[in-house]
């Protein structure tokens, strides 16, 4: 049995031309240029949101500590009543660290009476008194 061979046909090389490749690169460049500023805005907004959350968390902690001190009728000269130190009045960053360790500050740093947040904003800490909780200045 003799099979007929099919005639050989001309097949041009498969692939993309240089012009097609350049056009794809140009389109990708345009898309990247349009998306990059939006990404940078999102990162900035995320830093601001983190700062606002930390600011609120610290203020809430100060209010809670003040409530505990009023309930226990402690004074600023009291030594810690227990191992977690929650009788210490918040007067500066060192005493705030008894309530919020540096590992839980989410990138904020505290020195003296000033807290520096991840986005660069700062807030001053005002010491707790017998009649009011410690406060944190608006950012």
Image: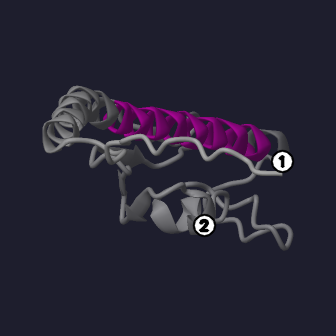
Q: Height in image: 6 above or below 107? A: above
The residue that appears at 46% across and 58% down in the rendered structure is 107
Local SS, label 2 = helix
Q: CA distance from mark 2 to mark 1?
A: 28 Å
Q: Is residue 25 above or below residue 27?
A: below
User: Along the polypeptide, which appears first: circle 2 or circle 1?
Assistant: 1
Extreme front residue here? Answer: 1
Q: Residue at x 28, y 44 (%)?
A: 121
Q: Is residue 58 magenta?
A: yes
SS for callout 1: helix
Q: Position of residue 30 (x, y in %)?
A: 18, 29
Looking at the picture, tell me which residue is in the foreground, 23 or 70: 23
> In what quadrant of the picture does the C terminus appear?
top left
x then y, percent, for residue 76: 61, 58
The residue that mark 1 highlights is 72
Q: Which residue is mark 2?
A: 103
């Amino acid at each position: 049995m003799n099979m007929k061979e099919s005639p050989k046909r001309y097949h041009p090389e498969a692939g993309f031309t240089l012009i097609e490749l350049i056009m794809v690169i140009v389109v990708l460049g345009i898309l990247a240029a349009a998306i990059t500023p939006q990404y940078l805005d999102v990162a900035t907004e995320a830093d601001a949101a983190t700062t606002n959350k930390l600011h609120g968390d610290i203020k809430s902690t100060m209010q809670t500590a003040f409530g505990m001190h009023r309930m226990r009728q402690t004074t600023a000269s009291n030594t810690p009543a227990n191992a977690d130190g929650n009788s210490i009045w918040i007067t500066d960053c060192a005493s705030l660290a008894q309530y919020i360790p540096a590992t839980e500050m989410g990138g904020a740093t505290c020195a003296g009476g000033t807290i520096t947040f991840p986005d660069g904003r700062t807030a001053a800490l005002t010491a707790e008194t017998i009649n009011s909780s410690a406060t944190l200045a608006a950012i």
